[in-house]
Amino acid sequence: MIDFSLTPKTLKAKKIAHEGAEYVKSISRYYDEFEHEELKEEEKKKINEEALKTMAVMAEPGPSDGGFLSMIVLGEERSAGDPMMAGAVSRAGLGNAAIMAVATPEQKARFGNLFCAMAITEPGFGSDTAAVSTTAKLDPETNEWILNGEKIFVTSGKRCEAVVVWATLDKSKGRAAIKSFVVEKFRKGMTLTKLEHKLGIRVSDTASIVFEDCRIPFDNILGSPNIKEAKGGQGGAMATFDATRPAVASMALGVARAALDFTKEKLEESGVTVPYDRGLHSLSAVQKEILDMEANLEAARLLVWQSASMLDKALRNSLESSMGKAKAGKAATHVCQRCAALLGPYGYSRDWLVEKWMRDVKINDIFEGTGQIQMLVVCRQILGFTRDQLK
Ligand SMILES: Cc1cc2nc3c(=O)[nH]c(=O)nc-3n(C[C@H](O)[C@H](O)[C@H](O)COP(=O)(O)OP(=O)(O)OC[C@H]3O[C@@H](n4cnc5c(N)ncnc54)[C@H](O)[C@@H]3O)c2cc1C
């Protein structure tokens, strides 16, 4: 039987995360207006306090939900305050997830405490990760890798302490030759060249990084340097996404829930309540739309929770994590747009956060694989097609 009733511990931690999110909401407009500004120390402290309190609750004795499931439940809660504020103070990026997925125990010990971003995207590609053209060549005399190329749209590229960089050992050998490398900042030849000005998630920095004859030790390669072995190459990095897509999806759910709760509150103030005990035929168009949106978010949430609980059981979840991300990204984007519309002109005003949430939430349908790419992954798996058979 599938049962997602959360344990008292997760519910207690969720309540603390909810209170933290209310605080984050109160400062989130400022960092939306003043992109690239660092959070103030007292704000970071307050946000970290919430994280410490929830961790303490999760460590209490008694039954627990799985680590991934509780992480995404708390992630949704925090994202209702701001989807990237927790990320802007935490010291774990997408690169850390890659290290957890493919690094050796020795590398985990060496890099585990570094805050690591992940750099895959280049000016020439985004979705088609086989097109990596940043190169890594081994210098046999010094036993160092020499990296050359440009990475763009690196989340936390400015704030991080190291970047997991995807580079090819030999472009003619395709995906098997793509490996990931940990590059600590700022090695000679590694330059941050640009910070993006973005539509949303403006509290999070997004950087371009150029590598020009950047030398790193041989042991900074994640996984095998052998081109025939997939571990640490694309296969390894894809495992990272199986673990992080539920987190990105829960972020979308948190933002959409914030927008929907706020909209319901405002509608209630003007006399429109949502009855849950009446037939659809007797509801107004607005009431029915709210129910539809709630149902869609709940459907997405169940998919996302399923994909996370599969990770907790060490089951392969590529299909479910892509389904969850596709559904959550689409449902949340739609909900935020409709909430802005239902609120009339104020939905479009900066007086309220709904317009910000509408801008913020769009990213969940873009990074870590767009909605279309998730659907492609889902179709391939259901139909049993290879990458080459279904592009
Ligand atoms: C704010 C932000 C932060 C980011 N952070 C990171 C990061 O930390 N690290 C990193 O490496 N990258 C990051 N990215 C890049 C992001 O992962 C890519 O933008 C994303 O993968 C899409 O790639 P693309 O933009 O090149 O779009 P393209 O691949 O050019 O796609 C353009 C459009 O075509 C669609 N499309 C493409 N291929 C297909 C297909 N086969 N079938 C159907 N439709 C298709 C896509 O869905 C999309 O709608 C970030 C991007 C943003 C905006």
Image: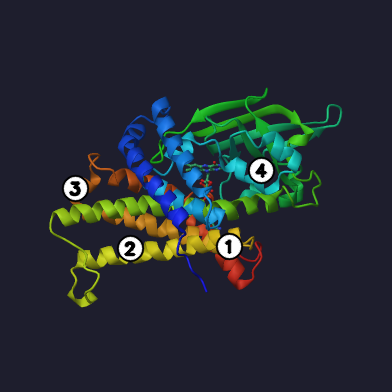
Q: Which residue is labeled 2 in the image?
A: 294
Q: Nearer the viewer, mark 1 or mark 4?
A: 1
Q: Secondary structure at mark 1?
A: helix
- Mark 4: few, some, or many residues within 10 Å (few <14, many ≥20)? many
Q: Which residue is labeled 4 in the image?
A: 99
5 to 130, vertically: above or below: below
| Ligand 1 under 8 Å from disc 3 Cβ | no
Q: Residue at x 48, y 68 (%)?
A: 3
Q: Is residue 387 left or right of residue 127?
A: right
- How far is disc 4 from disc 2 in space, using C-alphas? 36 Å
Q: Secondary structure at mark 4?
A: helix
Q: Nearer the viewer, mark 3 or mark 2?
A: 2
Q: Position of residue 66 (x, y in %)?
A: 55, 57
Is residue 257 or residue 235 the one in the foreground?
257
Mark 1 vs mark 3: which is more N-terminal? Answer: 1
Return the mark for residue 310: 1
Q: Which residue is labeled 3 in the image?
A: 345
- Mark 3: few, some, or many residues within 10 Å (few <14, many ≥20)? few
- The answer to whether one can see residue 87 in this image is yes
**Which residue is most to the front?**
61
12 to 350, vertically: above or below: below
- How far is disc 1 from disc 4 in space, using C-alphas? 20 Å
- How far is disc 2 from disc 1 in space, using C-alphas? 24 Å
Is residue 87 or residue 174 the one in the foreground?
87
Mark 3 vs mark 4: which is more N-terminal? Answer: 4
Mark 3 vs mark 2: which is more N-terminal? Answer: 2
Q: Amino acid at mark 1?
A: Met
Q: Position of residue 71 (x, y in %)?
A: 51, 51
Q: Amino acid at mark 4?
A: Ile
Q: Is residue 41 left or right of residue 314?
A: left
